[in-house]
Image (cartoon, rainbow, N blue to C red):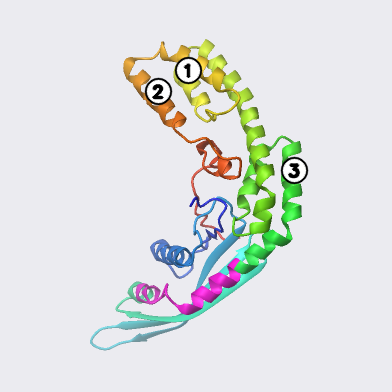
């Protein structure tokens, strides 16, 4: 299943590292990814509307001296699910952990290693947050649709599509209601993209910037209403390229054309490369 249009939680890490090193926070992040994926939620999302973020608070630290120094640490590990735009908390979890070692860093590493990704209470935590997230989408579906309609009227189709892809398929009623609108937004976006990119491609063709032409045409859907123009321009470009470049170009054209005709639903949006709004980003700052 495509991760888009599924519930996802963007992992936020503290901008102030406090007692933990960057490497130690990275270990905690890895544990969080395991926790959410284990319970059917993506830990990496295209939308940052819902967050999961950790806290690691040391409340006791002892040093025992003898034949060798031993440091022991007691800490509270907490997780929170929160909505970014409203700062509303949806669920929380906390667990005491202890660690010891011959140095403070080793004691901290030992404490972090005690964070279990299989704690039964984590399932309750994730399920509670998931339930409230789904309720948010179902209860605010009309407003989300209105916001997307406003973007469409302003011809800001990418923003409309981004809003539609936020709505998880688990929110069945709302997800069903946005199907037709999401396809309309996608088609309008492709029409807009065709107009802009075909014009830019023709300009670069006149300037003999053949690779630039190719780059302008790549994002366009081969099944769009400008497919004829795309092929005419590419055919002109091919004659100007070296044999090696022609082979690369033809292979990319074949790969694009092999893609199945997309069904008239939101999956049209989700599976097409040109609408992926950049790579999945793990945001590492707290708000």
Left or right of 221? Residue 149 is right
Mark 3 residue element: helix
- x, y percent for residue 155: 71, 34
Q: Label 3, on which residue?
A: 149
Highlighted magenta segment, given as a residue range:
109-130
How far apart are the alpha carbons under marks 3 and 2?
37 Å
Tell whether label 1 touches label 2 (CB within 8 Å): yes
Q: Residue at x 38, y 26 (%)?
A: 251
| Quarter occupied by residue 34 | bottom left
Q: Residue at x 56, y 59 (%)?
A: 7
Q: Residue at x 50, y 55 (%)?
A: 44
- x, y percent for residue 151: 72, 41
Is residue 48 found inside the magenta-colored segment of the image? no
Query: Is residue 161 placed above or below 34 in the rendered structure?
Result: above
Give the mark nearer the N terminus: 3 vs 2: 3
Left or right of 256? Residue 192 is right
Q: Label 2, on which residue?
A: 249
How far apart are the alpha carbons under marks 2 and 1?
9 Å
Foreground residue among 260 and 59: 260
Tell whether label 2 touches label 3 (CB within 8 Å): no
Mark 1 residue element: helix
Left or right of 266? Residue 38 is left
- x, y percent for residue 14: 52, 63
Q: Label 1, on which residue?
A: 234
**Overall secondary structure of the magenta section:** helix
- Tell me how many marks there are: 3
Mark 2 residue element: helix
């Amino acid at each position: 299943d495509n991760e888009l249009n599924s519930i996802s939680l963007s992992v936020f890490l503290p901008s102030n590292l406090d007692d933990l090193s960057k490497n130690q926070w990275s270990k905690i992040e890895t544990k969080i990814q395991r926790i959410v994926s284990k319970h059917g939620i993506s830990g990496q999302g295209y939308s940052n509307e819902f967050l999961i973020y950790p806290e690691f608070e040391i409340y006791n630290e002892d040093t025992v001296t003898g034949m060798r120094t031993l440091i022991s640490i007691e800490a509270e590990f907490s997780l929170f699910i929160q909505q970014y735009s409203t700062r509303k908390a949806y669920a929380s979890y906390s667990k005491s952990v202890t660690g010891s070692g011959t140095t403070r860093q080793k004691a901290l590493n030992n404490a972090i290693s005690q964070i279990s990704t299989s704690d039964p209470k984590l399932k309750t935590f994730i399920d509670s947050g998931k339930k409230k997230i789904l309720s948010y989408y179902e209860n605010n579906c009309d407003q989300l649709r209105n916001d997307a309609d406003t973007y469409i009227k302003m011809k800001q189709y990418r923003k409309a599509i981004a809003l539609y892809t936020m709505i998880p398929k688990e929110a069945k009623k709302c997800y069903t209601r946005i199907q037709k609108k999401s396809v309309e937004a996608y088609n309008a976006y492709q029409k807009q993209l065709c107009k802009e990119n075909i014009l830019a491609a023709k300009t670069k063709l006149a300037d003999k910037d053949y690779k630039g032409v190719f780059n302008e045409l790549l994002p366009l859907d081969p099944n769009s209403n400008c497919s004829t123009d795309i092929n005419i321009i590419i055919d002109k470009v091919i004659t100007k390229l070296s044999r090696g470049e022609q082979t690369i170009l033809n292979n990319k054209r074949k790969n694009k054309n092999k893609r199945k005709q997309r069904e008239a639903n939101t999956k049209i949006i989700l599976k097409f490369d040109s609408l992926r709004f950049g790579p999945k980003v793990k945001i590492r700052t707290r708000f």
